[in-house]
Image (cartoon, helix red, strand yellow):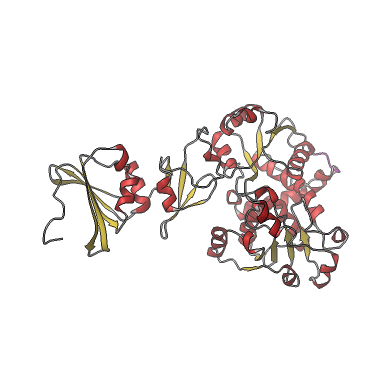
């Protein structure tokens, strides 16, 4: 199968192989090496929801590999006239070799994968999954620590609606990381996910106290409290800005601890943190390019050379 | 009950035995016997059972359940025994077994699932995630389905 809808579509061996491929593609992602592996191929970027990094990094990945991109946004298209996702995807199948989809409704990526025969990469479906973000997160963690196994990863913020942390928590536990889940009571990780994780033998602790979790952390993964996912503005106001990190908070951290964030940030990461050795979120955003290059190649059946040289 | 029959034997139709006590009305709803059909139905609730302590039982006249209908039944009564009656005798015993995949049996109950748009043409699909305890999820959005909600969302 060449679709990537959830992390379950990739075995641990495949994940490690994609991370290795991504590592070799870093120089191509920077533009230092010309490697037109996807020349003549067309990617359809189907964004039914806002995106900055995901859409742009997919576009950069495709173009750095010599391919081209059709950008779609639901504003100003037939979607506004009531076209079904099924019909829109039939059209995409005729125009492109592979499609990336982000959609506000959960299950939209699996639905698209069933509707057409070209490969589908899920770039976020409602509060569901965001596996390509997970791949770049795993890449960033492995880049910093050399491994994933045995690390204590602290996931912070909106763990209820945040699709990024849903996909990531599954993947981290598959590789033997320990999870500390820090969130307000109203935004805790859904029970069904925590139960799934525990049923695989994962070590998970839950807390509302971020500062207490810093000394034992190898990775602190901050997330934005997502206003757009709250049914009620009052509920949002109660928890907005509840977790914030600044440079001073890093004094009690372990050596090598990194702070990650899928971005955009609002107030949860103070700009004073940006210049610390711990800040890794802009590097993380760049890592979206090589990992998405590797994912595009895998889904299109294109092998990445064992050595990538200038 | 050996002392006397609570309901009379039926000539032709289906007998569903070993329904968990108190669930017979849900079974009737799931099989849409209450809305779509005019078959005579006898319902026995909370009778003693060696196997289950207490059980419910249904006798539906002039109707033989097909496999798709059995799939529905399995969602709330996976251990039910089904007998097809012809001319007052048991002609067939049907096995109630939960299907791994249930296509167009019920709509996903999650309000933000892609399948909530009634114009989307792909079939509704539920996946059997676990038999014991029974857990069913939507194939598309992955959300766990509440059993009571499934009954309200039958197709």
Question: x, y (%) of residue A135?
Answer: 69, 51
Q: Is the residue A240 above or below the residue A79 in the image?
A: below
Question: x, y (%) of residue A55?
Answer: 74, 40
Residue A200 shows in the view: yes
Question: x, y (%) of residue A99?
Answer: 65, 36
- The quadrant of the rendering that contains the N terminus of chain B is bottom left
Magenta highlight: main SS: loop
Position of B33 with respect to A152 (left or right) is left
- The quadrant of the rendering that contains the C terminus of chain B is top left
The magenta stretch is A32-36
Q: Identify the image quadrant of residue A173.
A: bottom right
Residue A1 shows in the view: no
Q: Is the residue B59 above or below the residue A259 in the image?
A: above
Position of A243 with respect to B69 (left or right) is right
Position of B102 with respect to A257 (left or right) is left
Question: x, y (%) of residue A115?
Answer: 55, 34
Q: Residue at x 54, y 58 (%)?
A: A192
Q: How many labels does the image show?
A: 0
Q: Which residue lies furthest to the front in this view?
A: A234
Residue B114 part of the magenta segment: no
Q: Residue at x 63, y 69 (%)?
A: A205
Q: Which residue lies furthest to the left in this view?
A: B3
């Amino acid at each position: 199968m060449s679709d990537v809808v959830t992390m379950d579509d990739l075995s641990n061996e495949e994940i490690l192989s994609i991370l290795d491929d991504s590592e070799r593609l870093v120089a191509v992602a920077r533009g230092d090496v010309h490697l037109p592996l996807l020349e003549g191929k067309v990617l359809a970027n189907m964004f039914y929801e806002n995106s900055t990094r995901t859409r742009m990094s997919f576009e950069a990945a495709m173009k750095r590999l010599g391919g081209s991109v059709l950008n779609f946004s639901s504003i100003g298209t037939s979607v506004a006239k009531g076209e079904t996702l099924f019909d829109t995807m039939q059209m995409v199948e005729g125009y492109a070799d592979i499609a990336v989809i982000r959609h506000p409704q959960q299950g939209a990526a699996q639905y698209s994968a069933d509707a057409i025969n070209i490969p589908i990469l899920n770039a976020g479906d409602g509060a569901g999954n965001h596996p390509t973000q997970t791949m770049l997160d795993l890449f960033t963690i492995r880049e910093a620590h050399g491994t994933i196994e045995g690390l204590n990863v602290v996931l912070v913020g909106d763990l209820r609606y945040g699709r990024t942390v849903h996909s990531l928590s599954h993947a981290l536990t598959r590789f033997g990381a320990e999870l500390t889940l820090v969130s307000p009571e109203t935004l805790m990780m859904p029970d069904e996910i925590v139960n799934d994780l525990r049923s695989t033998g994962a070590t998970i602790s839950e807390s509302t106290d971020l500062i207490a979790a810093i000394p034992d952390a190898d990775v602190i993964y901050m997330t934005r409290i997502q206003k757009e996912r709250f049914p009620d503005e009052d509920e949002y106001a109660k928890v907005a800005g509840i977790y914030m990190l600044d440079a001073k908070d890093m004094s009690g951290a372990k050596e090598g601890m990194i702070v990650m964030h899928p971005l955009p940030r609002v107030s949860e990461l103070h700009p004073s943190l940006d210049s610390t050795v711990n800040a890794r979120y802009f590097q993380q955003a760049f890592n979206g390019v090589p990992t998405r290059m590797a994912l595009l190649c895998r889904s299109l059946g294109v092998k990445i050379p064992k050595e990538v040289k200038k | 009950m050996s002392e006397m029959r609570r309901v009379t034997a039926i000539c032709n139709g289906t007998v569903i035995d070993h329904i968990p006590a108190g669930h017979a009305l849900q079974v009737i709803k799931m099989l849409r016997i209450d809305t779509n059909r005019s078959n005579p139905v006898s319902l026995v609730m909370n009778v003693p059972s060696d196997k289950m302590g207490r059980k419910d039982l249904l006798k539906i006249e002039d109707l033989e359940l097909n496999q798709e209908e059995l799939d529905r039944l399995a969602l709330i009564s996976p251990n039910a025994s089904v007998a097809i009656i012809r001319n007052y005798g048991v002609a067939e015993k049907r096995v109630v077994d939960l299907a791994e995949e249930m296509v167009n049996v019920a709509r996903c109950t999650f309000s933000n699932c892609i399948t909530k748009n009634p114009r989307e043409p792909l079939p509704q699909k539920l996946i059997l995630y676990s038999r014991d305890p029974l857990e069913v999820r939507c194939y598309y959005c992955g959300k766990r389905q509440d059993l009571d909600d499934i009954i309200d969302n039958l197709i």
